[in-house]
Amino acid sequence: MAFLLGHATTAYTHHPTPITLPTKTGEKTPFQTFTTSALPPCTLNPLLFNGHLQTMYTAVKAAGPPIHYKRQIFTSTHSIYPGTFAVDFVVPKKVGEEAKADEELPERTTLYTAEEWEMAGEGSEDDTPMLISLHGLSGGSHEIYLREVLEPITAKGWAACVVNARGCALSKITTPHLFNARATWDVRQTIHWLREKFPKRPLYAVGYSLGANILTNYVGEEGDKCVLKAAIACSNPWNLELCNVGLQKSWVGLEIYSRTMGQNLLKLYEKHQHMILKNPNISDEKVRASRYLYEFDRAVQAPTWGYPTENAYYRDAQSVDALLAIKIPFLAINATDDPISLVEAIPYEEFRQNPYTVLCTTNWGGHLSWFQSGGKRWFATAIANFLTKMHDEIDVDAPLPGREDADAKTVEKKYPIYDPCNRKLILPDA
């Protein structure tokens, strides 16, 4: 009966003694208690009764919330991977409608003028909460799933931006590099800029699918130096190599999901091939012969980043280990029937080991789906509720347990050392 009414089963995985969050009233609440009170019951459309139907329903065209953006092109400060990347900042509807449409950009997106950008960076006293979003594979700020979260958040007065992966959302690349599932440097540079320009703004972040993998890697790499107040990973594939193997085991996985993702990446290649082919290690013939996601990664992503195989790329880029290095409140949301981010790839034990993390799983929902009757997505409400409750009720400026004296501590090295973000034990030379 529960299933016929659309009720999914929700479960939470976390450390036996998770961190306690200091509230603005002076009390403390365990992180998992806060999370379970913030997330609503998961009720979905009973006609979309499994992960495949939920996921495939994303192909149904819908307008989605009309979010307006101003785009700024950043010049990368990375010494090894220079180039440019696009960040889209949410602007009021009136501002967006008054701007002249740009046919070379996504709908409701226009470029900042030099004067507008100069004014946008003047906010030293601005304490508006801000959400930074990272989209999924080959997506961008225009994605409906992303806008469904931005709508209720910005309606409450939050600022927001989307870091577009290189080459996505009709952005141009100036080096032979597309995005990378391990490429945390663009989001790092964006957050550094926001921190400099708006030192009083509390910053939060959410990542979807591939963007969730990148965000998890970023938060893990930053460790106790992370300036984000909280982060959310939605439909993270976690173990990329395992998900790749799983997709190839079934006809649906290979011919529907892997082929669709591969074709979307080939469209990106078509737009940027003149720049991508400046890398002598990439063969146009091999790229055009690829049909599936893993074949594209073998032909483009592996040689672009110096990996010998696509599986070496997956092993290095996956975020399953970086989870252990996270030192801020971190929520993950996955559906166990997700046909792309497979349940076998979810790092349950790692969540039990890290007191800063909580995993919410539902037994139904698909990939970036969780469609409810009426077409809205459950996860959008869950994420918006979590973020607004975090900002409204938690004293996010108070030190978290285990981080109070992080800068002052001098930790003696004791071998062997396990570094979650380098994936290898570190041993002395002798």
Image: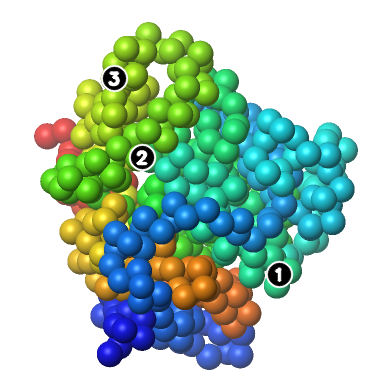
Identify residue type, mark 1: Ala
The residues tagged by marks 1 and 3 sit, at their Cα atoms, a distance apart of 46 Å
What label does residue 155 carry, if any?
Answer: 1
Relative height, residue 224 to residue 122 (above, below): below
Q: Earlier in the sequence, mark 2 or mark 3?
A: 2
Circle 1 residues within 10 Å: few <14, some 14–19, many ≥20: few
The residues tagged by marks 2 and 3 sit, at their Cα atoms, a distance apart of 15 Å
The quadrant of the image that shows the C terminus is top left
Examine the image and state in which quarter residue 337 appears: bottom left
Residue drawn at (32%, 57%), measured in percent from left and top?
323
The residues tagged by marks 1 and 2 sit, at their Cα atoms, a distance apart of 33 Å
Give the foreground label among 1 and 2: 2
Tag 1 secondary structure:
helix
Relative height, residue 335 to residue 103 (above, below): below
Instruction: Kindly tell me whether residue 124 is visible in this rendering.
Output: no
Identify residue type, mark 2: Met
Q: Report the side of 87 relative to 404 (left or right).
A: right
Instruction: Count the labels in the image.
Output: 3
Q: What is the x, y in percent for residue 202?
A: 64, 64
Q: Viewer-proximal residue, 44 or 68?
A: 44
Q: What is the x, y in percent for residue 182?
A: 38, 40
Tag 3 secondary structure:
helix
What label does residue 261 carry, if any?
Answer: 2
Tag 2 secondary structure:
helix
Q: Report the side of 195 relative to 247 (left or right).
A: right
Q: Report the side of 90 relative to 125 (left or right).
A: left
Q: What is the x, y in percent for residue 27?
A: 53, 91
The residue where tag 3 is placed is: 289
Q: Earlier in the sequence, mark 1 or mark 3?
A: 1
